[in-house]
Structure formats: structure tokens, C-alpha cells
């Protein structure tokens, strides 16, 4: 796999991160439509999962079967799923010149498994193995307070518009709040890669903010590369 970020002809890799109930899926769909309208080929994918092998691992992880083996083992399983996803879905799409929009990626492991107590040096090594140089060009962090995210997930589950909460969604407000702070710290440490959006705005306002950043950072860079 190559370390080249945006070589001419290579697609763009945009990841979406945030706590539970941040509104990632809505915004991914909106960005997909806008890019499609701009004539861009888009692949939408998610983690854990996004390839047949990784979807098998997803079922184990979200069912809680790996939890009893401890957070290090969970981190390794997320990384194993990611390695397969990168190899079989993300890298081939980027090489074709497609845009890839991914619901969660390596930053989720940093935050969720980091919060669960996994050592940073261990997470560094796992990440390097799993992503093999395939790093996002842009990461959109949709930020909402923990209580708001929890209330949104609860409302989705009670109206039957979503499946019952998974193993990670049932954790308490303190945990969700620590994850929120860790995401914000990560974003502050890499401002060139992250766009932090206030998820308390209307969905239309969030969409516009994301579109402005994508046009400014990636679409324009692409046009210049071809000039
Ligand atoms: P999912 O149903 O895809 O939820 P969401 O809409 O919140 O993305 O479930 C993924 C869950 O797995 C989510 O609670 C976050 C967690 N997760 C990790 O703990 N580590 C990871 O590396 C990833 C990708 C997800």
C-alpha cells in the first residue's frame, strides 16, 4: 500500500467521527448526495464493518462477545476489521479515484478503546498495522453534549426507527462525556485534518458547514491538481 496522500487521480478519504447520536449517518448521506451532484463517484462505508470479513467481526464486537476478553482484545479486533476494510474496500476505491465517506475510522479506536484504558503506545502500533498508511484527508467531528446524544439514541430506539442500542450505546453519561472530550482533544492536536462541527445546529446548518469545508479543502485542491 502506498503512503501517497492525494496523488493526481487518487480519490479522497473523508471520515466522520463523534459520540452516540451525533447525526453522522444523516450528514454522510447529505454529503454523498452533494458530491454525487458534483459528478463525483462516492463509496459510503462504515466501521466496524464495510467488507465481508469486517462485517463478521462487527457482529462479534457489537454483540458484546469480545467484551469479556478485555479492552486490548477489543482494540485488536477493531484493528483486524479495519485492516480488512482498508485492503478490500477503501484502498481499491481510492485507487479508482472515488471518494470514500466512512462512518467512524481509527479515531474511534483511539477514543473508545483509549477511554476503556488501552495504552496509547499499544494503540499507536495497532493503528499503524491496521491503516498501513491509508489516512483520512479530512475527518469531520460532529460534536454534541453527551446527554443530548444519549437522548437522541433513546428516542430512535423507542420509536422503533433503529435497532436496540448496542454494547457501546448503553454506557452511561460520564463515559460518553469522557469520549467527547477525547475526540475534541484529538481534533485540537491535528487541526489540519479535522473539521469540528457543532452538532446542536440544525441538520441543514451542519450540512452547509461540512460542504464548505469539503469544497474548500478537497474539491478545490483537486481542480488545481488537474489545471
Ligand atoms: P454503530 O452501530 O456503527 O454505531 P454508530 O452509529 O455510533 O457509529 O456501532 C459502532 C460502535 O462501535 C459505536 O458505539 C462505537 C464503537 N467503536 C469502537 O468502540 N471502536 C472502534 O474502533 C469503532 C470503529 C467503533
Image: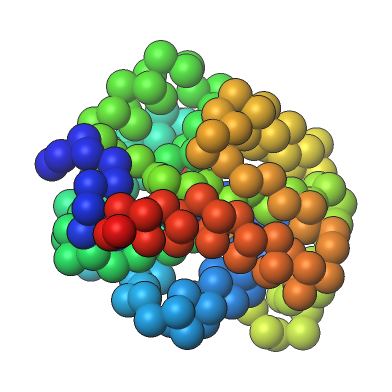
Q: Is residue 165 visible?
A: no
Closest to the observer, 133 or 212? 212
Q: Is residue 79 visible?
A: yes
Q: Residue at x 47, y 18 (%)?
A: 120
Spot occupied by residue 182 in the image (x, y as percentages of width and height):
66, 30
Q: Residue at x 38, y 81 (%)?
A: 39
Q: Residue furthest front?
A: 227
Q: How many marks?
A: 0
Q: Residue at x 70, y 60 (%)?
A: 209
Spot occupied by residue 196 in the image (x, y as percentages of width and height):
68, 45
Spot occupied by residue 105 in the image (x, y as percentages of width and height):
44, 48
Q: Is residue 167 above or below residue 172?
A: below
10 left or right of 26 in image: left
The quadrant of the rendering that contains the N terminus is top left
64 left or right of 167 in image: left
215 left or right of 75 in image: right
Closest to the observer, 84 or 175? 84
Spot occupied by residue 181 in the image (x, y as percentages of width and height):
73, 32
Q: Is residue 55 above or below residue 129?
A: below
Closest to the observer, 62 or 177? 177
The quadrant of the rendering that contains the C terminus is bottom left
Q: Is residue 205 above or below residue 88?
A: below
Amino acid at each position: 500500500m502506498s503512503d501517497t496522500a492525494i496523488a493526481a487521480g487518487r480519490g479522497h478519504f473523508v471520515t466522520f467521527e463523534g459520540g452516540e447520536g451525533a447525526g453522522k449517518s444523516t450528514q454522510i448521506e447529505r454529503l454523498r448526495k452533494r458530491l454525487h451532484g458534483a459528478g463525483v463517484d462516492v463509496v459510503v462505508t462504515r466501521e466496524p464493518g464495510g467488507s465481508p470479513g469486517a462485517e463478521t467481526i462487527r457482529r462479534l464486537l457489537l454483540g458484546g462477545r469480545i467484551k469479556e476478553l478485555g479492552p486490548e482484545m477489543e482494540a485488536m479486533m477493531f484493528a483486524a476489521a479495519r485492516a480488512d476494510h482498508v485492503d478490500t474496500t477503501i484502498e481499491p476505491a481510492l485507487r479508482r479515484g472515488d471518494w470514500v465517506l466512512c462512518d467512524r475510522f481509527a479515531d474511534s479506536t483511539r477514543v473508545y478503546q483509549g477511554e476503556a484504558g488501552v495504552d496509547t503506545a499499544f494503540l499507536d502500533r495497532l493503528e499503524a498495522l491496521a491503516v498501513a498508511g491509508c489516512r483520512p484527508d479530512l475527518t469531520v467531528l460532529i460534536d454534541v453534549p453527551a446527554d443530548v446524544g444519549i437522548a437522541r439514541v433513546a428516542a430512535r430506539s423507542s420509536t422503533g426507527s433503529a435497532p436496540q442500542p448496542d454494547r457501546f450505546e448503553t454506557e452511561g453519561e460520564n463515559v460518553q462525556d469522557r469520549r467527547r472530550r477525547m475526540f475534541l482533544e484529538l481534533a485540537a492536536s491535528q487541526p489540519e485534518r479535522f473539521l469540528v462541527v457543532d452538532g446542536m445546529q440544525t441538520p441543514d446548518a451542519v450540512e452547509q458547514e461540512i460542504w464548505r469545508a469539503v469544497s474548500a479543502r478537497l474539491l478545490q485542491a483537486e481542480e488545481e491538481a488537474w489545471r
